[in-house]
Amino acid sequence: MVFGEQIHSFVRHAESRHLRIAKTISMVIAHAKQQKEIQLRDLVAGIYVANFERILRFWPGAATFEDFVAEHCDWSEHRLMTWDRWNYELQHPPRTISIPFTSGFFQIPRKHTFAGKMFGLSDESKRVYLTAEGLSPNKVTSFGRVVPLITPELFLIATVRTEGVELGRRLSDSGIQLSALEEAAIRQLESPDKLMF
């Protein structure tokens, strides 16, 4: 196996830009809850914050969507406040101090920041990603490999379809229009690569 193939052999799927932002927001949420790993409910709350306008059309109304996230995802902060948390982190990076007469430097992390923290994924989240990989009709090239593309819509359908996921059962009982969501999720795209960037 070539060295470059070893490095990227872990790549099993690609996330659309919409899901990548939602995953970043889920890190903000996990950090605010003082967790070491991202739970499935954090990812769904991240989709609510980052993709509200995109996902709202599948719900009976905004209040239903917001109530579901507050009740079942343990995140009642308004989505714009969550965006403010993320923006604050971007605008206040760790301090970098250069060592005089060398090219060395070190960073002084701020207290209560998620910058530089590594969050793992919970087992439940990993199972949902695995289901989404199997459901995805769209394939893209990522790090030289052809892999399934996962969108927020597909992730929500995978949450419902993954066996033994309580949040998936609650999601299907919440009033969300599953048939319309599934149609959007498994629609074959003409150029799926364009959703990556």
Image: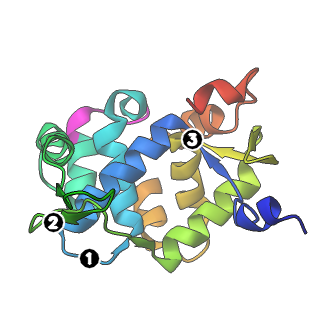
- Residue 106 inside the magenta-drawn segment: no
Label 2 and label 1: CA atoms lie apart by 22 Å
Towards the viewer: 111 or 2: 2
Q: Quadrant of the N terminus?
A: bottom right
Towards the viewer: 8 or 64: 8
Work out whether mark 2 precedes mark 3 in sequence or the reverse, and give the earlier one: 2
Label 3 and label 1: CA atoms lie apart by 25 Å
According to the picture, the residue beneath numbered tag 1 turns out to be: 35
Give the magenta-colored segment's residue range.
58-63
According to the picture, the residue beneath numbered tag 3 turns out to be: 151
Instruction: Decide if residue 27 is on the left or right side of residue 85.
Output: right
Towards the viewer: 108 or 103: 103
Instruction: Decide if residue 153 is on the left or right side of residue 72.
Output: right
Secondary element at tag 3: loop
For marks 3 and 1, give the one nearer the viewer.
1
Residue 197 visible in the current orientation: yes
Secondary element at tag 1: loop
- Residue type indicated by callout 1: Gln
For marks 2 and 1, give the one nearer the viewer.
2
| Magenta stretch, overall SS | loop
Q: Residue at x 53, y 60 (%)?
A: 159
Q: Residue at x 18, y 50 (%)?
A: 93
Residue 174 visible in the current orientation: no
- Residue type indicated by callout 3: Thr
Q: Residue at x 27, y 53 (%)?
A: 68
- Residue type indicated by callout 2: Ile
